[in-house]
Amino acid sequence: MTQAYEPLRLHVPEPSGRPGCKTDFSYLHLTDAGTVRKPQIDVEPADTADLARGLIRVLDDQGNAHGPWAENVPVEILRKGMRAMLKTRIYDNRMVVAQRQKKMSFYMQSLGEEAIGSAQALALNIDDMCFPTYRQQSILMARDVPLVGLICQLLSNERDPLKGRQLPIMYSVKDAGFFTISGNLATQFIQGVGWGMASAIKGDTKIASAWIGDGATAESDFHTALTFAHVYRAPVILNVVNNQWAISTFQAIAGGEATTFAGRGVGCGIASLRVDGNDFVAVYAASAWAAERARRGLGPTMIEWVTYRAGPHSTSDDPSKYRPADDWSHFPLGDPIARLKQHLIKIGQWSEEEHTAVSAELEAEVIAAQKEAEQYGTLAGGQIPSAATMFEDVYKEMPEHLKRQRQELGI
């Protein structure tokens, strides 16, 4: 007798919140602060499966630090981290305003994600190479990169170090271990793995750190990078920033519904962690652990940072069209700056007065840098790099046909 079946249907993931309703964040599967174990540095990748399902957290809702991941995080690192996060948020705010004033064409802020880049930057060495995507400007702030050059790049003016060849926010700062940002998503992962492999081939001690968003994990480059990192035990940290949204699609569309992104690393033979990305202390501790593992030749670590993109995807985006407008205020992992501030005050290493004073100091620093950068031109005011620069920095020796074209243009 033939079995009767219902017609087949595909499953299409839906976000747990849409405009006009409140998001149900229960899908995050949170764990209490201090309850997730910290394994030995030489743990086998297969034995990190529970760490890829749980959530490493240190700070509780009252700002207290708990558990093994809270150990050995220096107070000076916490204070530097607070300054870097504040500076990032102030910088972002002013650059968004500048874009609205038509001084630049485009901007992408990292509101709500400031802890991830700043904490990891402080856990790495300055000569380790970061392969970032477009929301890790906090790495640059933590490494004290001068702001004028960054803002000139945004303004595409005559002092733009990239000579107008990159979309605003796609910085390149070799001296600060900040590899050129690529607009083609997921390329950073294979580049980072390749750089780490090259470091090992040369017998160096430098490691790589590569960054990707939850949406870009659906790209084939992501899987290629995991294969090479696992096979050759590349000295690299593979960061997946799960901020719940790609441009306008929920993270479940990229495969985060029935499993975790960190779980993919375990399946590829890579030690993997899932971490509260809004907990600066947890981010620093997990990054330091992964960096030590890479530097000892024990191979890669993949880390899923659970966070929330609090603002629009970019200045071209209106998130109120696809998610509740007040989502961030309900996100259970809170604001990374507010959480670290609460912790520092609790341990007597910060105060409301110092917070106000440091914020004012950093605001003045950003304003001064912006004024200086704008002297070299803005998008609205011109003073762009010379057209002659299109012929430069491509060939070691300029071919004759390009020399002729340049002469024809009279430049």
Image (cartoon, rainbow, N blue to C red):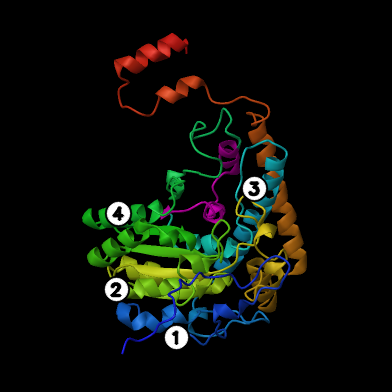
The one nearer the camera, 10 or 397, is 10
Q: Quadrant of residue 281?
A: bottom right
Q: Secondary structure at mark 4?
A: helix
Spatial distance from mark 2 to mark 1, Cα to Cα? 20 Å
Q: Residue at x 59, y 70 (%)?
A: 15
| Circle 4/circle 3 CB separation < 8 Å | no
**Residue 132 drawn in magenta:** yes
The one nearer the camera, 372 or 393, is 393
Q: Which comes sooner in the sequence, label 3 or label 2?
A: 2
Graded by Cα atoms within 10 Å as few (under 14), some (14 to 19) or many (20 or more), the crowding at tag 1 reads few
Label 3: which residue?
315
Give above or below for 310 relative to 406. below
Spatial distance from mark 4 to mark 2, Cα to Cα? 18 Å
Q: Which mark is residue 194?
A: 4
Label 1: which residue?
37
Span of residues in magenta: 127-154
Q: Disc 2 or disc 1, which is closer to the eye?
A: 2
Q: Residue 98: x percent and y percent?
A: 70, 41
Q: Residue furthest bottom?
A: 1
Q: Which mark is residue 269?
A: 2
